[in-house]
Amino acid sequence: MAYSLFLGCVAPNRYPGIESTTRDILKELDVDFVDLENASCCPAPGVTRSFHQETWLTIAARNLAIAEQQGNDIMVICNGCYGSLFEAAHMLTDEKKREEVNKNLKEIGMEYKGTVNVKHFADVLFNEVGVDKIAEKVKINQDKLKVAVHYGCHFLKPHKLKEIDDPERPTILDKLVEATGATSVEYMDKNLCCGAGGGVRARVPDLAMGMTKTKLENIGKAGADVIVNPCPFCHLQYDRGQEHLADGDKIPVLHLSQLFALAFGVDEKRMGFEEHAVPVKLPS
Amino acid sequence: MTIMAEPKTPNPAFTKEVIDAGADTLNLCFQCGTCTGSCPSGRLTAFRVRKVLRRAQLGFKEDILPTDDLWYCTTCYTCHERCPRGVEIPDILFVLRNMAVKEGHMGETHKKGAGYLIKTGHLVPLSKEYREKRKEVGLEETPPTTLANKKALEEVQKLVKKTGFDKLIGGE
């Protein structure tokens, strides 16, 4: 079975390099996927779920129903999309909830039967592809790279539903990063939120930046060369949240797909580094 | 001279409304404060998530719905993970935010994002500039989403009409 690849908003519309490298590395790793054609926003939980849960669930159900018609499970490349679509799919395993939402979907001649699983691509890479296969594909060893891994929140939490890793002391992303030869460095408050989620970036930007600054400071102290994340929204928050830092103190930000693309020797043009606010200068 | 604030009268009707709207773990909270102690927003502001829960338990609607505090939560789920009583705290905040919005308490930037969702199907829309940047990395100019298919976008627009989301955010 193939996965229906769900792009979300920030990757295709702000960091196209995340989308292109995701496509390249999935092909390289023989992960079978098709596009989740005609998808919309997941829709973003910070605003949509906060405003009107029924609308959030209905639009998410439409995305799930498209994947169901394609006969696939969904793969996401963003923690926010994961939060939305995973939670929605979980809620819609309840028949009564599904009936309510299907009354809305009837308006556009669709129905969701409740059969789709939603997977985060990092979970697929770790648990289905495996670090050994990833390591085999590495052409350019990243052994000079000291990485500050940022997990983000909705990748692992709530852990009772997601069952991917320990939510307080996770290791899965560190292992994925180290499969490229890089070193994952420890830093204070590693599992702290980037600050962007829940609609805080849009509504209370100073508060969001307060958290981002704490993380950047801790990451800087740990001597990391780069921040690697599994979420375009955290990526955006870190990448655009470094204006207050002197050029020499800025830390480049890579989505996990971009790190793998570097290690697999993917064409530099596909990386989309020109869209990054912080220049991607890595030790070589 | 009054030297103490008058005690407030609890409003159980509002508490019931909150619970019925999905906050079914609200009354499991015994006010230990683990949530507040774990909260990244609480480190930087006076936001105390424990207090929001207490106010909800007592039905102090006016101390919750119009406040900015309600929007300080990044939904990081750390409180949810650590709560010794299994209170689903972010989910309760979603319920309260839905009620606040219904009463017209919406951030302007959030309304704008919601408007983009209705107009384009994406909360973060695609601009001409980024269409060019997509081509530069070898992608199609437009991603294969509602942005590329008018019929798909119309489906989303029909759904937001059906749920009343367009009216809620003040469109049409």
Image: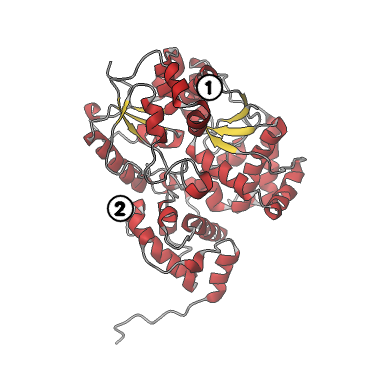
> Residue A231 in the image: x percent, y percent?
45, 34
Residue A207 appears left or right of B117: left
Quadrant assignment, res A202: top left
- Which residue shows up at 43% across the image and 53% down it? B81
Instruction: Tell which of A236 and A91 is nearer to you.
Output: A91
Residue A273 appears left or right of A55: left
The secondary structure type at the circle numbered 1 is: helix
Q: Amino acid at mark 1?
A: Leu
Q: Is residue A275 visible?
A: yes
Name the image colouring: secondary structure
Q: Is residue B47 visible?
A: no
Quadrant assignment, res A145: top left
Mark linked to residue B44: 2
> Residue B132 in the image: x percent, y percent?
51, 19
Spatial separation of the CA atoms under disc 1 and disc 2: 40 Å
Quadrant assignment, res A188: top left
> Residue B111 in the image: x percent, y percent?
52, 47
Q: Amino acid at mark 2?
A: Leu
Q: Using the image, name the chain to which the residue with label 2 belongs.
A: B
Q: Residues within 10 Å of mark 2 (few under 14, many from 20)?
A: few
Residue picked out by circle 1: A26
- Which residue shows up at 44% across the image and 41% down it? A165
The secondary structure type at the circle numbered 2 is: helix
Classify A282 as above or below B124: above
